[in-house]
């Protein structure tokens, strides 16, 4: 399983765009990159998943360079309610069940 | 749909006591998981079940047992609780993504366990 490295914490102000980068140097060919969000006292929640280039949904964008050794989660115009821990996971297709969450990135959005 | 439900929400045990954490999902998912999360840490996989009738060890299985009772329910048992098992326990289930890739996991609200 590919190991991931993320910044431990980040601060931002409301209305700014936030980019959180995840390093996964030994990502395998069939691995996907998935991001989860966790609010205090809640279980993680799926945000976005991608394999290469760029993926966008109503919540975030995910940028993956050609070598796929890193990825960047982009949150547009954050609000106070985006304060949470964000986890980057790397893993294979269905059937690979041992997901590794790591310690995540603690994002604090300031007013 | 209730999603993933867990009981109890909070429990205090004395060292050596046993208890079972219950988890149920109503999304017809095949796969289910138990994680623990210690303060300031990420989630660590205890056990998982790829389908009804099968279970496998995760990263930290020692001190725990699981039962996949049916497709909906996956329980976690602590036979003899220890203070090191003080943690928040999350149950999850997952579904295959129609677009391919990793399965998407859906988490319950967690059970906070304190072992004295």
Image (cartoon, coloured by chain):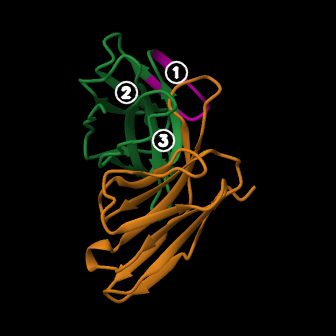
Chain colours: A green, B orange
- Mark 2 and mark 3 in contact? Answer it, CB < 8 Å: no
The residue labelled by disc 3 is: A78
**Same chain letter for marks 3 and 1:** yes
User: Chain ID for label 3?
Assistant: A
Residue at screen point 42% across, 66% down: B65
Q: Residues within 10 Å of mark 2 (few under 14, many from 20)?
A: some
The Cα–Cα distance between marks 2 and 1, rounded to whole angstroms, is: 11 Å
Q: Is residue B96 left or right of residue B42?
A: right
Q: Which residues are magenta?
A: A53-62
Q: Name the N-terminal-most of marks 2 and 1.
A: 1
Q: Residues within 10 Å of mark 1 (few under 14, many from 20)?
A: some
Magenta stretch: dominant SS? strand
User: Chain ID for label 1?
Assistant: A
Residue at screen point 42% across, 55% down: B47
Residue at screen point 70% across, 47% down: B28
Question: Residue B111, relative to residue A103: is it above or below?
Answer: below
Q: Is residue A94 left or right of residue B59?
A: right
The Cα–Cα distance between marks 3 and 1, rounded to whole angstroms, is: 18 Å
The residue labelled by disc 2 is: A72
User: Chain ID for label 2?
Assistant: A
Furthest-front residue in view?
B53
Residue A100: quadrant of the picture: top left
The residue labelled by disc 1 is: A55
Percent position (x, y) of residue A102?
30, 46
Residue B5 seen in the figure: yes
Percent position (x, y) of residue B90?
48, 61
Furthest-right residue in view?
B1
Percent position (x, y) of residue A99?
40, 42
């Amino acid at each position: 399983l590919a190991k991931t490295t993320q910044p431990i914490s980040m601060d931002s102000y409301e209305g700014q765009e936030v980019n959180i980068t995840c390093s996964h140097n030994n990502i395998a060919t069939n691995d996907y990159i998935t991001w989860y969000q966790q609010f205090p006292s809640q279980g993680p929640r799926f945000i976005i998943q991608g394999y290469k280039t760029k993926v966008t949904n109503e919540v975030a964008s995910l940028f993956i360079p050609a070598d796929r050794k890193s990825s960047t989660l982009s949150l547009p115009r954050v609000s106070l309610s985006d304060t949470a821990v964000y986890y980057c996971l790397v893993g294979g297709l269905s059937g690979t069940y041992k997901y590794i969450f790591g310690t995540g990135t603690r994002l604090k959005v300031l007013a | 749909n209730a999603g993933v439900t867990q009981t109890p929400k909070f429990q205090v045990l004395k060292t050596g006591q046993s208890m079972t954490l219950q988890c149920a999902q109503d999304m017809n998912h095949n796969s289910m998981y138990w994680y623990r999360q210690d303060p300031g840490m990420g989630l660590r996989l205890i056990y998982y079940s790829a389908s009804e009738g099968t279970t496998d060890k995760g990263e930290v299985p020692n001190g725990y047992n699981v039962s996949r009772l049916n497709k909906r329910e996956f329980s976690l048992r602590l036979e003899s609780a220890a203070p090191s098992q003080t943690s928040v326990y999350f149950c999850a289930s997952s579904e295959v993504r129609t677009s391919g890739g990793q399965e998407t996991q859906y988490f319950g609200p967690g059970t906070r366990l304190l072992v004295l």
